[in-house]
Amino acid sequence: MSNLESINAHLEELRKRLLRVVLVIGIITVVVLTFHAEPINIGEVTLYYPSPDPQNNIAAQITNHMRENLVPSDVQLIQTAPGQAFFAQMYVSALVGMVIGMPVIIKEFVGFIKPALKENEINVSRNISLPALGLFVAGCVFSYNFVIPYILEFLYRYGDSAGLVTFLNVMEFVTFVLQFLLAFGFSFQLPLIMYAISMSEMVGKDFWRKNARYAIVIIIIFGAIITPDGTGVTMMFVAGPMIGLYFAGMLFIERKQREKLNT
């Protein structure tokens, strides 16, 4: 097979895998935009079943939940142009589609790079697939409960101290929240990325410890890039957990390497 034919074959495989990913995310997005999560009580347990309701859909329910739990009490969430609420729900639906479809995304990604991997790298990629999903969800949950509420409260406290009435556009609010959810979801993959690189023997056993200071600088720069203000306070909401994840990953890798040497 010539180089051109090989490239075309890889591109065709990539197209098929991307199409499957887009299809899965698209189906979930449509479901979230079309159905309402109706509660049903079975004893002391509350379950939910989908009920067709395009206007009061699951995305709208999630948006309402974000408004009630994330927006400071003295801030009004508003719509300033027709369709903003709908597009905000589209963004929310796409995020839900990405989270629920993450197993498919990981499966297709691993399947695409598998031919280029060695046997030990293939085993590592299989072992990290499920933890990758768990860490992504954990990052989103951590951001939603412990980071976003405090950042919003911190930023809008300035308006309150100046006696201003603050209005928050729904699109800006949803974009802000999704930005942090995705940032934390992907940043929580850091220990897994470190583990995969180390177990694939792409770096030496002391690589992460020797380069810790450079990693901290890069993480702080990353936190400064994705945070919306220049105070440095909100930056640490992002950089702090990532630095902790880096050292947790480093200690875990060192322990695994010691166990491997002792066997």
Image (cartoon, rainbow, N blue to C red):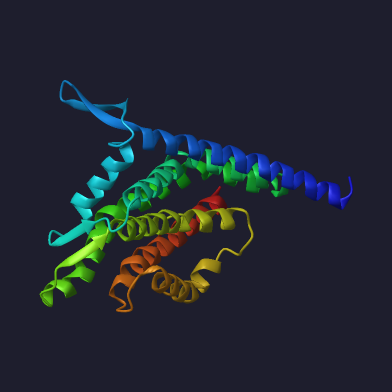
Camera-nearest residue between 69 and 246: 69
Q: Nearer the viewer, residue 133 or 201?
A: 133
Residue depicted at 35% across the width and 50% down the height: 83
Q: Is residue 203 above or below residue 23?
A: below
Q: Farthest residue toward the top?
A: 42
Q: Residue at x 41, y 47 (%)?
A: 95
Q: Quadrant of residue 49?
A: top left
Image mark count: 0
- Quadrant of residue 43 within the rendered picture: top left
Whether residue 191 can be seen here: yes
Q: Is residue 97 left or right of residue 70?
A: right
Q: Quadrant of the N terminus?
A: top right
- Horizontal and vertical percent for residue 113? 66, 47
Depth check: give the residue in front, 221 or 203. Answer: 221
Q: Nearer the viewer, residue 225 or 141?
A: 225
Where in the figure is residue 56, as x and y percent of width and height? 27, 36
